[in-house]
Amino acid sequence: MPEGHTIHRLATRHRELFAGRPVRAHSPQGRFTPGAALIDGRVLLDTEAYGKHLLHHYEGDRILHVHLGLYGKFADGELPEPAPVGQLRMVLTGSDHWLELRGPTACEVIDPSAADLLRARLGADPLRDDADPAAAHARIRASTKPLSALLLDQSVVAGCGLIYANEVLFRAGLSPATPGVTIDADRWTAIWDDLRALMKEGVARGRIDTVHTEHTPEAMRRAPRVDRHGGEVYVYRRPGQPCLVCGTPIARGPMAGRNLYWCPTCQPPVTPSRKG
């Protein structure tokens, strides 16, 4: 599933291609035909990303809401619009470009009140200037759940996905199993600031890079990582490979139905506190 930096990049891209002009909308597969009719011919005023949700704001208080989920993806190009291939949920065309959407989890036209409800159920998005990290910390501090699960909970931190959660915990030296209740304000501020910086870099580069300068392939004289997700990372999808910092084999294990990755040495297990 695309992480938040990808959705913010898409919002910027769509704004650049279509904002300020009317667009034509249709649904080649037919599943979005009523929704397409609601925005067809209207001016796209602006675009917005919130976590993993993309919003197109059209004149007349009509908002296109898209959540890509596991299989959704966009494609775009210069006109003329190509003939539909496969199951296309939606096609938008502007004065110069076309946009295709296939396989999303959600593709719907909503009103401003529904958009407000959507935002209200999402947590703080590190890529938004209006984010409230203190609200996220309040949820984390009140929970005994593992910090990894809390970072992946979109009602706590919106837009953070599996890669960023694994990597920011490594960079913080914290086991994925660390209970949220143990994270004080100073530690959370450091995690939040690091996550925000990593995700902003992801927006700029279009890929997830999390390693410090001294651990890049050039600095370590090692081969670049080859993975469909791209980017240089410390632990994500590196089970059994040596940690770039200490050399310990990277571990992998399930938690809340997700595969987590960590270094047993750099991220030691939490030691239960003793009473008495």
Image: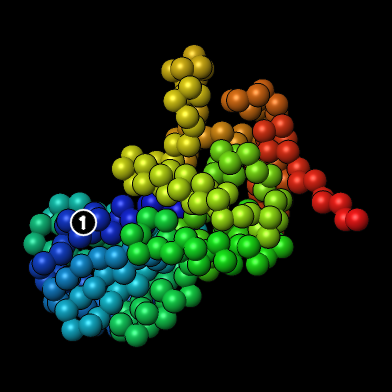
Q: Is residue 4 left or right of residue 14?
A: right
Compared with 237, 255 (above or below) is: below
Seen at 56% across and 33% down, the residue is 234
Using the rendered image of the protein, determine whether residue 176 is visible from the camera's viewpoint. yes
* Residue furthest right in the image: 276
Report x, y in % for residue 241.
65, 27
Quarter-of-image position of residue 38: bottom left
The residue lying toward the viewer, choosing from 46 and 124, is 124
* Residue furthest front in the image: 276
Seen at 63% across and 54% down, the residue is 183
Q: Secondary structure at mark 1?
A: loop
Q: How is the image coloured?
A: rainbow
The residue lying toward the viewer, choosing from 222 and 164, is 164
Q: Residues within 10 Å of mark 1 (few under 14, many from 20)?
A: few
Quarter-of-image position of residue 82: bottom left
Q: Which residue is mark 1?
A: 82
Total residue callouts:
1
Amino acid beneath label 1: Pro
Report x, y in % for residue 111.
31, 84
- The quadrant of the picture occupied by the C terminus is bottom right
Report x, y in % for residue 190.
51, 46
The residue lying toward the viewer, choosing from 120 and 67, is 120
Seen at 66% across and 23% down, the residue is 247
Q: Is residue 109 left or right of residue 245?
A: left
Using the rendered image of the protein, determine whether residue 165 is visible from the camera's viewpoint. no
Compared with 251, 273 (above or below) is: below
Seen at 61% across and 62% down, the residue is 140
Quarter-of-image position of residue 68: bottom left
The residue lying toward the viewer, choosing from 189 and 169, is 189
Q: Is residue 198 left or right of residue 180?
A: left
